Amino acid sequence: MIFQKLLDKLRNKHFLSLAGNGTMSALSMVTYAILYRLLPEADMGNWVFFQFIFALLDAARTGFLQTALVKFYAGSTRPEKTAIAGSTWYLAAILTGVFALLNLPLLLARNSIADTGIQLFIHWYGLNFLFSLPFNVAFWLLQAEERFDRILVLRIINQGSFIASLIVLFFLHQVNLQTVMYFYLACALCTSTISIFLGWAQLSNIRHKTLHHVKNLFHFGKFSVGTYICSNLLRSSDSIIIKFMIGPAALAVYNLAQRVGEVIELLIRSFLGTAMPAMATAFNQQEEGKVVHIMKKYAGTLTLFLIPVTIGMFVFADVLVLFLGGGKYANTEAATLLRIFMVLALTFPIDRFFGITLDIIHKPELNMIKVIFTLIINVVTDIIAIKITGNIYGAAVASFITLIFGICFGYFTLRKYLPFNLNGVLKLGYEETKNMITTTLRKRPVL
């Protein structure tokens, strides 16, 4: 009885979103902890390179459809939701088919490429793109419906099965880039199959697609895709530049610091996941004041949540790097980089909420412009800083300059369309945090 009451207290969208992203982050860190210990540094760097480049291409599909789906789906009638889901599937299938076809000529040329990381990517990205389609669509739809409990289930299946596969490979003494890739693809296919079987992907709704909703998704997506691609390229640009300017071993060190800092990203994804449907519903109902209130409330709450997390990770950076990467990374730049990332992380909530609010108020082209300029600044400062310093600390310096520009651009652009300022952000965050704690404690379990 007590256990059931405790479950009832925690069964809300905020906790489930955080649990889903937290589980994803924790399992991802376990996965990387295993791979860092089992793969040589160069192979690990190439695996990281594959992940970054695939994420960049996947951004073309996710960026085109995810935000558009949530925006139009939230607050719509049931028939409209069915048509939007079907239209999303229609566009997603076309995009996936195009990328799969583009993979064919590249396969013919892969043997003439000496770089192992590029070879790995060319060989496998087409299948990975195809196998991951259904569970990606399921994630978008479940986010729009605020079914974070089901998202949690799919994430556990996907990452949990991959970890189990790595353990099997370890005992069979078969851990290498190729076998890791085989099981990575198999786990993606398994998750997609389950999402279709359970009906969470809504594949059958593709027959309900309409030209009207396809056009709406397309015209919104043509801007949001630019934003999403550039955002992923922004996160990946450091890694790409480091790989080719310093080498894959340096990339492994840099990525290790980023992976440890993934806890920050999981908090941001959790809050964005619950805020987006609420903001979209408010905007669709022409309540601009409520959109501003939700944005400031969530940004302030997230910033307050990040303060103790940032302090803790700053203090225990060396221990965290040792835990994730093992002894061979203990005396590298990873811990110092992690501390730098943690200081910068306190500005992430404001920056991310400015961007997503531009999308919600139907100004995705401005968010795209913001991210394009931010990307250009990051690439230029990365190259200059790394050449000057000769090490990966240069990329951290570039990140600081990039963040300052992104926040300023987002703030002054958003003020042209919404009546708001930054006054009261932390106050609203404090009130929301206090309310969440009070509400949870008030629901005492019955004996």
Image (cartoon, rainbow, N blue to C red):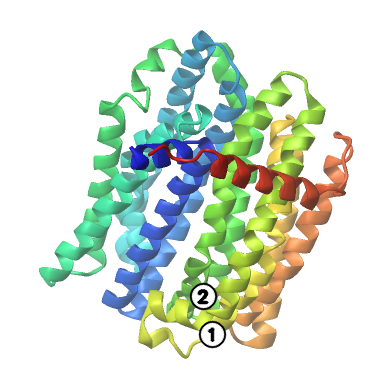
- Residue at (31%, 70%) from the top-left corner? 35
- Could you tell me which quadrant the C terminus lies in? top left
Q: Is residue 92 left or right of residue 357?
A: left
Q: Against 257, is 52 above or below?
A: above
Q: Secondary structure at mark 1?
A: loop
Q: Against 158, is 53 above or below?
A: below
Mark 1 and mark 2 lie on one chain; the one further toward the N terminus is 2
- Residue at (50%, 47%) from the top-left corner? 18
| Image x and y of residue 69, in percent | 55, 27
Q: Is residue 299 left or right of residue 67?
A: right
Which amino acid, by three-letter code, is at mark 2?
Tyr
Distance between mark 1 and mark 2 Cα atoms: 8 Å
Badge 1 density bin: few <14, some 14–19, many ≥20, Cα 10 Å: some
Between residues 221 and 266, which one lies in front from this camera angle?
266
Which amino acid, by three-letter code, is at mark 1?
Glu
Q: Which mark is drawn over residue 333?
A: 1
- Could you tell me which quadrant the N terminus lies in? top left
Q: Which mark is drawn over residue 125?
A: none
Q: Which residue does the numbered mark 2 point to in the structure image?
A: 254
- Residue at (62%, 72%) from the top-left corner? 311
Residue sitting farthest toward the front: 447
> Across the whole image, how many numbered discs are drawn on residues?
2
Q: Is residue 357 left or right of residue 218?
A: right
Contact check, label 1 and label 2, Cβ < 8 Å: yes
- Residue at (59%, 65%) from the top-left corner? 309
Asked if residue 98 can be seen in this view, the reply is no
